[in-house]
Amino acid sequence: MSQRTFTIVKPDSVEKGNLGKILARLEAEGFKILGLKRLHMSTSQAQGFYAVHRERPFFGDLVKYMTSGPVVAAALERADAVPHLRKVMGATDPAKADAGTIRKEFGESIERNAIHGSDSPENAAIEIGFFFSTSELL
């Protein structure tokens, strides 16, 4: 049975011209792109999206980074979408990510790690709803 997940290609990846490579990799992994949106997140959008981290010491830097340039948000679908995307992305720290993962190939650091992905089906639904209306998911 298919499952939905959510990803953001982060500002460093978009700025370096890696967006197409990352999207092609996701499609090669069997993800169907249901919705795709390029945007420059406002401070309030980034604060709202990452509200779960509000009390963490890195919150301010995360918001600053995520608003530093354009990002691309995508709603994705495939069987076992959430765990498969997590596997394809690799560890949060690119230095610790497995060879062949998106973060190993395109990430710079724990903060500038190329891509965000939902950590559960429940959070995927919330995150997709943050950026897309139902009518935008095709």
Image (cartoon, rainbow, N blue to C red):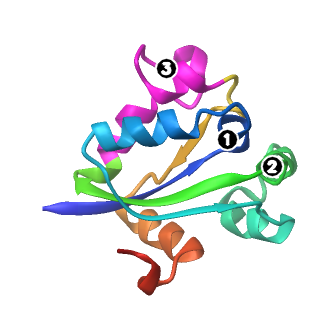
Tag 2's secondary structure? loop
Q: Earlier in the sequence, mark 3 or mark 2?
A: 2
Up the image or down, 53 lies above or below 12; here it is below
The residue lying at 42 percent from left, 17 percent from top is: 98
Quarter location, residue 131: bottom right
Return the residue at label 1.
14
Up the image or down, 61 lies above or below 77; here it is above
Q: Which residues are magenta?
A: 83-107
Question: In the rendered structure, does residue 84 fall within the stretch colored magenta?
Answer: yes
The residue lying at 36 percent from left, 34 percent from top is: 87
The residue lying at 72 percent from left, 43 percent from top is: 11
Return the residue at label 2.
69
Q: Earlier in the sequence, mark 2 or mark 1?
A: 1
Q: Name the dominant secondary structure of the magenta segment.
A: helix
Q: Earlier in the sequence, mark 1 or mark 3?
A: 1
Return the residue at label 3.
97
Amino acid type at circle 1 is Val
Q: Are marks 2 and 1 in contact (CB under 8 Å)?
A: yes
Tally of numbered discs: 3
The CA span between labels 2 and 1 is 8 Å
**10 Å crowding of disc 2: few (<14), some (14-19), many (20+):** some
